[in-house]
Amino acid sequence: MTRRLEFLATAAGRMTYGKVPYQNLPRARNEGARLAQGAIVVYVDDDVEPVAGFLLGHADPYSDPAVLGVTGPGPTPGQPPKGHAKIGEGTWAALMARKDMRFDVNFAFSTQWAVGCNMSFRRQLFEDLGGFDEDFVGPAGDDAEFSHRVRKRGTIQYTPAAHLIQLKTSSGGLRDSAGQARYVWQTAFCINYFWFKIETPRQVRCRMTLRAFRREVLNWWTIINGQWLPFALAFLRGIRDSERVIRQLRRERT
């Protein structure tokens, strides 16, 4: 943090630094869009290292007016992006048909969604679509849900030139600020709410939520450490609370 503040002090005339008192990721993203003065808004996480040419990689695809958003590779250190031959013909065909998504390949394609740690959008979209959904409470979903609305109007382009390294640090971010049980609550809330917002059938939403329960609660770490029960209760509270928000949205629509 000290190094970051020192750098920002040297660039005070070119950059605006805003610190918010709340813990709401989509709200902070919306506030960033309101502060932005350019036509394109780029988002990254706090544990990434952009590769040379990163911003140009985001800017170039917008020469096509149909492109409304851009995303790119976010591999971990030492993991080079994979080519067509490396991922196999079936995976490549699924990406081209927008039936799959991955952020570790070295070729361009029109994608399903932009990942939160490496994404950009035309700033006008925030006025047209109302920005990110601030009902999302934690680690997942608002980026993909916003992308879902964007793709109804145009395309989101994955380009290898918009390349950064995702460090995946073990501390900081939403997990630290929330605590483990609350992080599980947030995950359950966001996953159930996300599948509702992108208009999937209820049986699909239930299936995806159950998959998340197995991943977040019934894994070897929680079982060995005796955490599965408090995590299960936290997960169920997340589902309950997201259902309350869903019911409220349904009432507002009728």
Image (cartoon, rainbow, N blue to C red):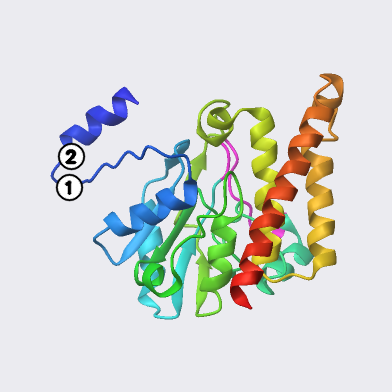
Expressed as whole percent of the image width and height from the top left, the position of residue 173 reads: 51, 34
State the count of labels. 2
Disc 1: which residue: 14
Q: Amino acid at mark 1?
A: Arg
| Element on which disc 1 rests | loop
Residue 79 part of the magenta-drawn span: yes
Locate residue 111: give its quadrant.
Answer: bottom right
Q: Determine whether label 2 and label 1 are within 8 Å by CB.
A: yes
Q: Residues within 10 Å of mark 2 (few under 14, many from 20)?
A: few
Expressed as whole percent of the image width and height from the top left, the position of residue 83 reads: 63, 57
Q: Is residue 125 above or below residue 178?
A: below
Disc 2: which residue: 11
Residue at point 64%, 42% (across, down): 186
| Element on which disc 2 rests | loop
Q: Which residues are magenta?
A: 75-86
Label of residue 152 in the image? none
Camera-nearest residue between 154 and 249: 249
